[in-house]
Amino acid sequence: MSRVFSGIQPTGNIHIGNYLGALKQFVDLQDEHDCIYCIVDHHAITVPKSAEELSESIMNVAALYLAVGIDPKKSIVFVQSDVPAHAELGWILTCSSTTGELSRMTQFKQKSKERESVPTGLFTYPALMAADILLYDTGIVPVGDDQKQHIELTRDLALRVNGKYGEDTFIVPEGRYMKSGARVMSLVDPTSKMSKSDENEFSRISLMDTPAKIKKAIMRATTDSDGIIKYDIENKPGISNLLSIYSAFTGKTVEALEQQYDGAGYGTLKKDLVEVVVESLAPIQEKYNEIRHSEELVKILKDGAERADAIAQETMKRVKKNFGLGIRL
């Protein structure tokens, strides 16, 4: 079976964009693939956080992994910093990357825009992300389509290293991108991606939001004035976003939804979407509350780290040998 790896930062406010663009795929893949899912806490410290906030967020995301349907008997679930090889390989790949390609990364340019100085980790973290993936001989990386640039960099680094140090050094992975709903947009500004960090809490729907808050966010969602329910990203980004979310949660095609709501008003679509989202998130929230503060969650993460570390050490033996690192007889 081809191996799958992906991870999510423990930064709070995990929203439906994260779920539809990545987490839902994680669950679907585990029946047919060897899956490894990580809480990437090293990435989280590129922006300063208190120890208490970070620790809480790590456990929250771990509980959400299980709540959405990831099965620790089928998949490995662990915390990145519990496997030291991530940082070790991250440094090796940082040395194999160039300042030019890292400076072209869209997320770095966005986060550093109009700032005189930013943490170095914001600049170099794509190399660590590549290490996360390559460390496990990953074949498939399920992510939202906004991560395509990072996957391409990972492939470029793998090919570069293989060409210089040996073709057996890394497996070159492929990205798997969800077509419908992969890029869920802000409910306030549908021309921008839904974001954990948006100051407007009604711009997103977090997985643990109450039904009342979900209703308020959707009913307030930006649309337009012509009243026609039609998928048209360029001219009707708000309605297109709502249709994409509806489609991703229900499995109905956008075309079928356009026919279903032909002649209906935006209010009708929004009210029905509220029901769809609330009903879809209810079992996730129930499972989350059941496991979040349990000893079982800690046990799963410790077991996952041990299993992940065993795989990572085998990769690092090969990488070090090919690079000429460490003691040799």
Image (spheres, rainbow, N blue to C red):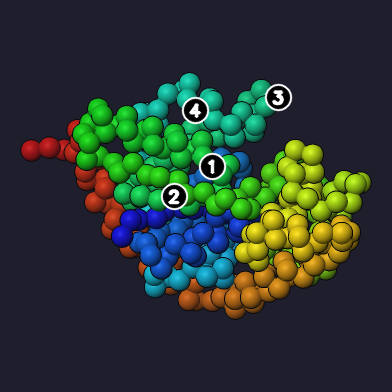
Q: Which residue is mark 4?
A: 102
Q: CA distance from mark 2 to mark 4?
A: 20 Å
Task: Judge the density around disc 2: few (<14), some (14-19), many (≥20) Cα neighbours within 10 Å.
Answer: many
Q: Secondary structure at mark 4?
A: helix
Nearer the observer: mark 1 or 4; the answer is 1
Q: Is residue 276 left or right of residue 109?
A: right
Residue 161 higher or lower than 206, as above or below: above
* Outermost residue to the right: 225
Quarter of the image for residue 54 reads bottom right
Of circles 3 and 2, the one toward us is 2
Instruction: Identify the residue position indicated by label 1 in the image.
Output: 147
Asked whether disc 2 touches disc 1, contact meaning CB atoms under 8 Å apart, the reply is: yes
Q: Amino acid at mark 4?
A: Leu
Is label 3 in contact with label 1 (beta carbons under 8 Å)?
Answer: no
| Label 1 element class | helix
Of circles 2 and 4, which is in front?
2
Q: Secondary structure at mark 2?
A: strand
Q: Quadrant of residue 168?
A: top left
Q: Is residue 114 left or right of residue 298?
A: right
What residue is at 73 percent from the left and 55 percent from the top?
243
Q: Which residue is mark 2?
A: 141
As helix, strand or loop, the secondary structure at mark 3 comes to loop
Residue at mark 2 to residue at mark 1: CA–CA distance: 10 Å
Q: Nearer the viewer, mark 4 or mark 3?
A: 4
Q: Is residue 56 left or right of residue 40?
A: right
The residue labelled by disc 3 is 114
Between the residue at mark 4 and the residue at mark 3, the CA separation in whole angstroms equals 18 Å
Marks 1/4: CA distance?
14 Å
Name the N-terminal-most of marks 2 and 1: 2
